[in-house]
Amino acid sequence: MDWLTLLQEAAPVMLKGAGYTLVFALASMLGGLLIGFPVAVLRILPWRVLAWPAAVYVSLMRGTPLLVQLFVIYYGLPGVGIELTPVTAGILALSLNAGAYLSESLRGAIASVARGQWWASYSLGLGYRDTLVHVVMPQALRVAVPAMSNSLISLIKDTSLVSVITMTELMLSTKEVIAATFQPLPLYLAAAAIYWVMSLVFEALQKQAERRLNRPHAR
């Protein structure tokens, strides 16, 4: 069987898997953002009782492999009575992992805003919360978008790991076709091309977001 015929026959299965990968990645991106923002805020608070648990969470997620985190959540939690479906376990693991990296990107961006911005806001009568939300955060987002977008793009590729917990996404779909055709090279290359295309789409969205955020400061 020539490569073109093989890819034509494999396309429906692989594209279906790619669709699951995209949905899976988007759900994990949303979960990562919902986790990352509050964690970043907790880490800059002056109260150690709140900042310390957030710092431990970030250190744990960044200091252990994502694959191990998947195994702990999917295979380990049933040992304490918590059973999750492959979809739920995969989204949870990816969201927790992405949230740690996103929180660090945002925390660094917040720290890059000059302290004078805080003091100026306080002198105008704004409190800590209003200063953070209305003055500091809009400036920090302009700095954080590139790093946060890179983390989200990496998340698309990280979804390939959920195949180890029997989640039928692009990588597992590719493996199933390979098992039936015994043609690994063209099929793995095709899978790589699909991941690349999805990453290019998100890179384009990243650049558009950067242009929008920087527009008020264009000269």
Image (tube, grey):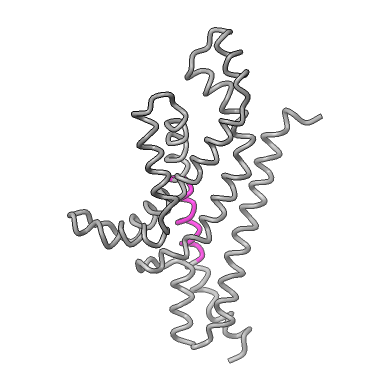
Quarter containing the N terminus: bottom right
Residue under the point 44% across and 26% down: 45
Residue 144: image location, x then y, percent: 60, 38
Q: Is residue 72 left or right of residue 170?
A: left
Quarter containing the C terminus: top right
Main secondary structure along the magenta-highlighted residues: helix
Residue 84: image location, x then y, percent: 27, 56
Residue farthest along the right direction in this orientation: 219
| Residue 136 versus residue 211 in the image, above or below | above
Q: Is residue 148 magenta?
A: no
Residue 136: image location, x then y, percent: 58, 24
| Residue 86 versus residue 38 in the image, above or below | below
Residue under the point 52% across and 23% down: 132
Residue under the point 37% across and 42% down: 56
Residue 83: image location, x then y, percent: 23, 57
User: Which span is picked out in magenta?
Assistant: 18-31
